[in-house]
Image: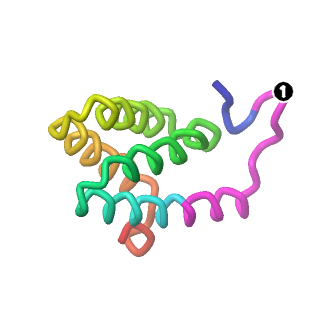
Amino acid sequence: MVTAKNEFFPEISEATKARYFSSLASQIHQLRQAMERSDNKSVREICHRVRGSASLFGLKDLGVVCRDVEEACLAENPEAIVSGFQAIEVIVSRHLSPAEAN
């Protein structure tokens, strides 16, 4: 796993972090809309994108839950998709300001 600072990657700048969290807020909004439509294909795709960069920005738990939601979508398990989405919202709310989270 790649972390925000190690011998291969310099520390991530505050501007880069701000762009990431702004993008994350947008992706979570899109995820919420896909959940409302029961669009599991879009839910899986969004979770895949979020998972891809979560660890780089120190959100390993978010990456793990997104992977679980991806797998639940593939297994067509609506209960696991919903519970995973709820976990994603909790994790993200810890990292975004209230204005960004909505």
Residue depicted at 50% across the width and 33% down the height: 60
Q: Quadrant of residue 5?
A: top right
Q: In the image shown, does 95 or 84 lie closer to the viewer? A: 84
On the rendered structure, is 15 left or right of 42? right
Residue 80 percent location from the top left of the image: 21, 35
Figure quadrant of the C terminus: bottom left
Residue 40 percent location from the top left of the image: 31, 48
Compared with 92, 37 (above or below) is below
Residue depicted at 36% across the width and 29% down the height: 71
**Which span of residues is magenta-colored?**
6-23
Compared with 2, 34 (above or below) is below
Q: Amino acid at mark 1?
A: Glu
On the rendered structure, is 22 left or right of 70? right
Q: In the image shown, does 40 or 58 lie closer to the viewer? A: 40
Q: In the image shown, does 71 or 66 lie closer to the viewer? A: 71
Residue 78 percent location from the top left of the image: 18, 40
Q: Is residue 17 magenta?
A: yes
**Looking at this rendering, what residue extends furthest in the bottom direction?**
99
CA neighbours of label 1 inside 10 A, class few (<14), some (14 to 19), many (20+): few
Q: Is residue 11 magenta?
A: yes
- The residue that disc 1 covers is 7
Q: How is the image coloured?
A: rainbow
Residue depicted at 40% across the width and 44% down the height: 44
Q: In the image shown, does 24 or 35 lie closer to the viewer? A: 35
Q: Secondary structure at mark 1?
A: loop
Residue 17 percent location from the top left of the image: 65, 56
Q: Quadrant of residue 7?
A: top right
Figure quadrant of the N terminus: top right
